[in-house]
Image: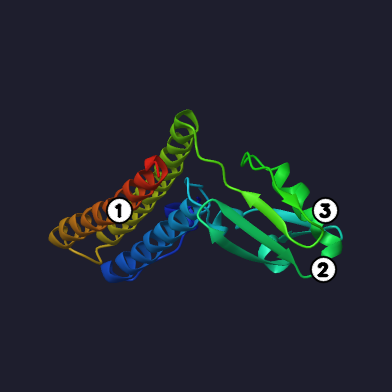
Amino acid sequence: MKTEQSATSGSTFKNVKEVETSAKARMEKAVTDLQHEMANIRTGRASVSIFDSLRVDYYGTPTPINQLANLHVPEPTLITIQPWDVSQIGAIEKAIRTSDMGLNPGNDGKIIRVPIPALTEERRKEIVKRLHGVVEDHRVALRNIRRDANEHVKKLLKDKTISEDDERKALDEVQKMTDGYIGRMDAAAKTKEKEILDIK
């Protein structure tokens, strides 16, 4: 996660509303980014989204699996992958086998079957730890956006565009916004953690 606009970038906002709108858009993007990253963290249940970030070497081009094959979850502990071009079966299987997912695919020449092993308690704890790291990175991103927004508000005050009262209100608003987005992230993380630790 990187914040795309820093307070020193010289971008100027004409009023508090512009600062808040920009901060809100960036915070929304951070939450979306977190949700996308969390979808790639595997739980004990089969889900095709665990392959979203995996790339297969397709004639020298790293290509997402879902652009090379149909993916299905016929049962809770199995994912099947049917390549449109069967000559790619080996490349897809190799990409899965060499990833850090701990999966052991097999194929019958037409379809790759990927059993999703039950997670050991130790593996679940490792995954939860990784989840916490991902969430913390995104919390830091939110705090950076808050800092940028606050600096822009202070600049508006310094340029005498707003009053001290306006500044106080705006800083409160930015803080409230930040708390709201952190709350959303924490709630999403809690749900994901429950999925990871949920032993079926």
- Name the residue at 68% across, 42% down: 104
Amino acid, disc 2? Asp
Residue denoted by label 3: 90
- Per the model, the C-alpha gap separating discs 1 and 3 is 53 Å
Residue denoted by label 1: 150
Badge 3 marks a residue whose secondary structure is helix
- Residue 13, given in percent of the width and then of the height, sits at 36, 67
- Name the residue at 87% across, 61% down: 59
- Which numbered disc, 3 or 2, marks the residue that appears first in the sequence? 2
- Name the residue at 60% across, 56% down: 79
- Residue 67, given in percent of the width and then of the height, sits at 70, 68
Is the C terminus in the top left, top right, bottom left or bottom right quadrant?
top left
Q: How many labels sit on residues?
A: 3
Do the CB atoms of the residues marked 3 and 2 lie less than 8 Å apart? Answer: no
Q: Is residue 17 left or right of residue 6?
A: left
Amino acid, disc 3? Gly
- Residue 167, given in percent of the width and then of the height, sits at 20, 58
Q: Nearer the viewer, residue 25 or 105?
A: 105
Badge 1 marks a residue whose secondary structure is helix
- Label number found at residue 85: 2
* Outermost residue, left side: 165
- Per the model, the C-alpha gap separating discs 1 and 2 is 53 Å
Q: Nearer the viewer, residue 25 or 127?
A: 127
- Residue 162, given in percent of the width and then of the height, sits at 21, 65
- Dot 1, crowdedness within 10 Å: few (<14), some or many (≥20)? many
- Label number found at residue 107: none
